[in-house]
Amino acid sequence: MARVIVDDLTKEYNSPGGSILAVDELNLEIDDGEFVVFVGPSGCGKSTTLRCIAGLETVTDGTLHFGDEDVTDQKPKERNIAMVFQNYALYPHMTSRENMAFGLKMSTDLSKDVIDERVEDTAEMMGIKELLADKPKALSGGQQQRVALGRAIVRDPEVFLMDEPLSNLDAKLRAQMRTELQQLQSELDVTTVYVTHDQTEAMTMGDRIVVLNDGKLQQVGTPLECYHRPANRFVAGFLGSPPMNFLEVDVDLESGTLSNSAFSLPIPESAVDDVSGSKLTLGIRPEHVSLVDAVETHAEPDHLIETEVTVTEPMGDITNVYLDVGGESLTVTSDDRLGVRGGDTVHIHVPAAKIHLFDAESGEAIKHSDEPIDSTRIAEASGHAETA
């Protein structure tokens, strides 16, 4: 295993139209045996960072260390890493056994018997022992993915690098493989860096997640830390489905209110000392907004907003209700017990304890939801309490 240290990593590409800054001074430490997920939109720099760690891209500036060893200028074969690609990258003319053994044959002086033993043991662990004589064209997508993972495991690397390895699988198999990968990584206890654009994978798989945008690090933390305590508006809006609602509000410190053309809400008590300026962005997650039927007897009448339903989206267990609030769209996830439909006028409750506030210009978080988070418990469960 290895501790991975990324220090001021910068990667710049030259193009006819000028230079492109893909990764901008990224700093990150990944502990031994930790499962870290890089997540962000397309073009955010997550795959480029992974390729720099692997040695497939040269670093423009900064350094990379595996433990105490500087690997910045080392070739990929010198780094003792194993990489799993999105397209599996299996040799079509080789059997599963030959694909899994190929890396060991090329990069080590292990005997054939030792290599065969490693392949057999790994295949049994992956549940693909009966597929060792088959070539890739005879395998399903999930089976090919297991062979690709097996090929990485037999190398017994210090670091696993995975570049969107599940994106080619259907939804059901992807969910199954997510669970299998977590169990596998826990058993092997190998430092793992996993790249995905899928926030569900990020939230469910990682000990910590690294959120990137435009080549810049936005936040590092446990999934629940990033979800309930987003560092800025980008993280808040990227994590969560449906995404967080954002409403631009005017601040009146004299009356202690946040308002726009559709409502006026009291500034949450926990944020009074932190609020300044004349404009903020109010954030509230769809699951924290509720439809109200008994308006007259509600416990927080000053946190009710009257609005109109534009569209409803039944999802089975819940219904996404889309509302027009002063010309801005707001989403509520509801059990649909009120049976609302497009065109209905409704009241919604925006609880003070669940409100997030962001600087209107920088997007930096000023106030988070008061949602309790037991990050220590989460970290201890993953075996990395010190990184939480």
Image (spheres, rainbow, N blue to C red):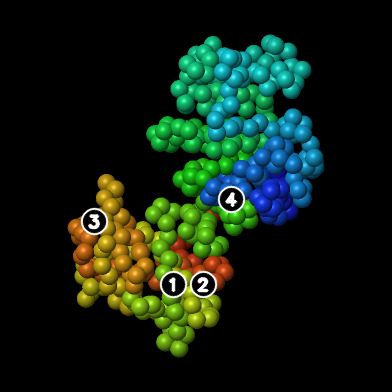
Q: Amino acid under label 4? A: Cys
Question: How many marks on residues?
Answer: 4
Q: Callout 2, which amino acid?
A: Ala
Earlier-in-chain disc, 2 versus 1:
1
Residue holding disc 4: 44
Residue at image x 49%, y 36%? 167
Which of pointers 3 and 1 indicates the residue nearer the eye? 1
Task: Decide which of 152, 1 is in the foreground and name it.
Answer: 152
The disc, 4 or 3, on the residue closer to the chain's N-terminal end is 4
Q: Residue at x 54, y 50 (%)?
A: 40
Which residue is denoted by mark 3 in the rendering? 336
Horizontal side of residue 123 vs 262, given as left or right:
right
Residue picked out by circle 1: 248
Query: Residue 279, can we see it?
Result: yes
* Residue to which mark 2 is pinned: 360
As helix, strand or loop, the secondary structure at mark 4 comes to loop
